[in-house]
Image (cartoon, grey):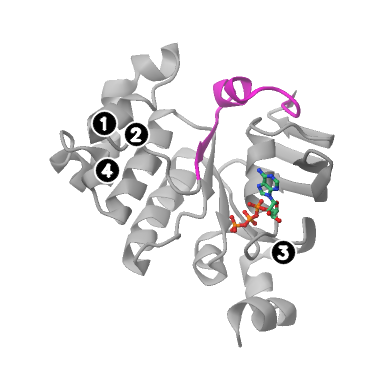
Amino acid sequence: MLKVKGLQAGYGAVNILWDISFEVGDGEIVAILGSNGAGKTTMVRTITGILKAAQGSVEFNGEELARKNARFVLDHGIVQVPEGRQLFTEMTVLENLEMGAFNKETKAHFKENLEKAYGWFPRLKERAKQAAGTLSGGEQQMVAVARALIGMPKLLILDEPSLGLAPNIVDDILDVAKTMAKQDGLSVLLVEQDITKALACADRGYVIENGRIALEGTSAELQANEHVKKAYLGI
Ligand code: ATP
């Protein structure tokens, strides 16, 4: 479903991504792994149309999305939970969730998807009228994930969901993504620095180093890889 080929992108004259190629199938959870500054967020921004690719293609369900704008990409079902969540902190939880319904179709299904979201994250129902900025970090991440799911994604991109959160909250969030992948065929691109958590959840993964894909494999293969063990897992 998502086929990224030879993607090259950067900021002005500075190139950050070099020849990035990977795929995500229907209902598959694929991890993009790498340390600080490896280029993960730049890759997410390029796929979602925030940043224009200098070269390469981003094919999604047969449609070319590279160099299209962010709204076009969103309308085709690629929805991201951005790094740092980016909630409207002065607005209530419910108002933030309403922002997830961005077009006719998602607005028409808002009520049922809101109930689903409250089912995954019951705490959000209790806090519906509270300003999002007053929630804990974990609760804010739940709002960001619920908002994205209300956008009825075909591909959900989670950019560093573990950042600054307690491990059990990260597990809860990844469990929701996993359930949706297995039950509803949602595809998930999980961009993470926490390689242990990401590989425990993902089916396959790619390791980015200095803007290039350095390694790829199933989660089991990457967990057993000597370079991954040494450089990322400290074992
Ligand atoms: P992190 O986990 O720290 O977010 P990352 O793998 O997501 O890391 P990126 O944010 O994609 O990495 O950054 C990759 C490189 O691009 C870094 O060297 C960074 O300094 C540079 N970079 C990021 N944003 C910009 C920008 N707006 N202008 C210029 N350079 C940038």
Q: SS at mark 3?
A: strand
Crowding near the residue tagged with mark 2, few <14, some 14–19, many ≥20 C-alpha atoms within 10 Å? some
Mark 2 beta carbon near ligand 1 (under 8 Å):
no
Name the residue that disc number 3 marks. Answer: 217
Tag 3: amino acid: Gly
Viewer-closest of 177 and 133: 133
Is residue 73 inside the magenta stretch? Answer: yes
Q: Earlier in the sequence, mark 1 or mark 4?
A: 1
Query: Rounded to the nearest whole Å, what is the CA distance between mark 1 and mark 3?
Result: 42 Å
- Whether residue 140 is visible: yes
Query: Rounded to the nearest whole Å, what is the CA distance between mark 2 and mark 1?
Result: 6 Å
Query: Rounded to the nearest whole Å, what is the CA distance between mark 1 and mark 4?
Result: 8 Å
Name the residue that disc number 4 marks. Answer: 133
What residue range appears in magenta?
64-82
Location of the C terminus (image quadrant): bottom right
Tag 1: amino acid: Met
Mark 3 beta carbon near ligand 1 (under 8 Å):
no
The residue lying at 34 percent from left, 20 percent from top is 109
Q: Earlier in the sequence, mark 4 or mark 3?
A: 4
Viewer-closest of 198 and 70: 70
Asked if marks 2 and 1 touch (Cβ < 8 Å), the reply is: yes
Mark 4 beta carbon near ligand 1 (under 8 Å):
no
Asked if marks 4 and 3 touch (Cβ < 8 Å), the reply is: no
Residue 132 horizontal/vertical position (percent)? 26, 40
Name the residue that disc number 1 marks. Answer: 91
Residue 67 horizontal/vertical position (percent)? 75, 26
145, above or below 114, in the image: below
Location of the N terminus (image quadrant): top right
Crowding near the residue tagged with mark 4, few <14, some 14–19, many ≥20 C-alpha atoms within 10 Å? some
**What mark, if any, has residue 88 been given in the picture?**
2
Query: Rounded to the nearest whole Å, what is the CA distance between mark 2 and mark 3?
Result: 37 Å
